[in-house]
Image (cartoon, rainbow, N blue to C red):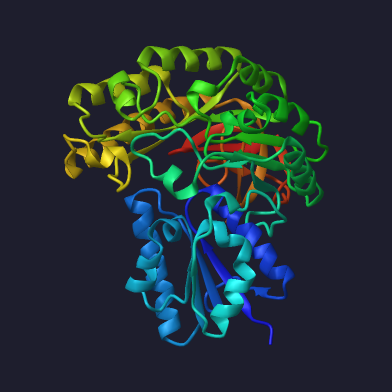
Amino acid sequence: MNFKIGMISLGCPKNQVDGEIMLEKLNRSGFEIAQSIEDSDLMIINTCGFIEDAKREAIETILEVAEYKTAGLISAIVVTGCLAERYQEEILKEIPEVDSVIGIGADKDIVKVCQKALIGVQTSFYPDKKYLLLEGDRMLSTPPHWAYLKISDGCDNKCSYCAIPGIRGGYIERSMESIIAEAKQLAAKGVKEVILVAQDTTKYGLKLYGEYKLAALLKELVKIDGIEWFRLFYCYPDRVTDELIDVIACEKKICSYIDIPLQHCNGEILKAMNRPGSYDELKTLLTKMKNKIPDLSLRTTFMVGFPGETEEQFEELCRFIKDIEFDKLGCFAYSPEEDTPAFDFENQIDEDVKKRRAEVLIDIQYSITESSNQRRIGNIYKVVIDGKDNDCYLGRSYLDSPEIDSGIIIKSNRQLSVGEFINVKITDYNGYDLVGEEI
């Protein structure tokens, strides 16, 4: 009997890559990969455990899948990922429907774990995090024309609010040769857009080569035929070098787009977060990037309600956002995470205050986006087609990353294919989305 295995992968793209490697291992071992819970014999839940909202989503997902098992629709449940690594035995204890819980270092053993779960053998083990799968053949879960490429994992930054170093372990990275080889494999599969991900992409090279090598890596990647766009996620502001800025500015295949999570702009708050920088230092960096990289699309994330954040410091953050005018902005409220230094900080902020501050930032950003979209009317962009909705096509320019950003609603007089690149003239906007027509 060929057992069918399904997977729900939660959280960040790095976790998604881990899931894709596991799926390929299972597929090669003879399991059939199912596309729904109803069609599965066993479900793997690849969890996130970064902040409270992510933990809640993971637990709710496990409980929902557990109902399928209780109803006899599936036979077994395996939980892995960050929540499993973080809470280990608690999941088995609190949710008895779960058959196996394994740490991220055990993902390489996923075939054996699933085989045991299907015959009723419970598994629970947590190898050293250094065994986390950093590379391997993958069954892509993204659409055929774009994919993530993980260049490193783990983190040594030790931001005071962040549980990631405790969950994912210390910083580890792949060789440049390994990354380039995988990018070539993705190109051979028809992938047109590759998004580089890590906990901190800008640190790449320091572990293996003793110096920052992201710019050098990009110079090699752009030589690969077939890939149209490379995109950068999760850059640490202190490590955005002049060389990296120049490479992004000069290489046509590298999107003029950078995801650079800043978390705050106030020097005192950043110091308490164990992050470098200040309003003026960050503004100087971002201004330099904007001046050197034509039409740069800047994405960032800010945290509100960090312990001790005053109204004045929050207002400084609001001024900073208006001053810089980010193209994309995410905002989340500080979540006190056990086993992090900030968990025990005094002057914790009331939840209602956090919520209000987050809403204020989102409102500010919406106004900035609206003005930006107005200015883009009449511009022509190279656009990749992601899908179709009724009579319109949905696509993205270099300005937008898949899954997290807005996009372009496109009218065309001919039939377009997913993954096709076309030129689009912007004629209007609808909320966060631009509207355009093929030319």
- Image location (x, y in percent) of residue 204: 62, 31
Residue 40, can we see it?
no
- Image location (x, y in percent) of residue 379: 60, 25
Q: Which residue is drawn at 52% across and 42% down?
A: 154
Residue 145, can we see it?
yes
Q: Quadrant of residue 35?
A: bottom right
168 or 261: nearer the eye? Answer: 168
- Image location (x, y in percent) of residue 382: 68, 33
Q: Which residue is drawn at 52% across and 35% down?
A: 234
Furthest residue toward front: 128
The answer to whether 162 appears left or right of 207 in the picture is: left
In what quadrant of the picture does the N terminus appear?
Answer: bottom right
Number of labels in the image equals 0
Considering only vertical position in the picture, is 45 above or below 2?
A: above
- Image location (x, y in percent) of residue 13: 55, 48
Considering only vertical position in the picture, is 264 above or below 60?
A: above
Q: Which residue is drawn at 68% across and 75% down?
A: 31
325 or 232: nearer the eye? Answer: 232
In what quadrant of the picture does the C terminus appear?
Answer: top right
233 or 420: nearer the eye? Answer: 233
402 or 243: nearer the eye? Answer: 243
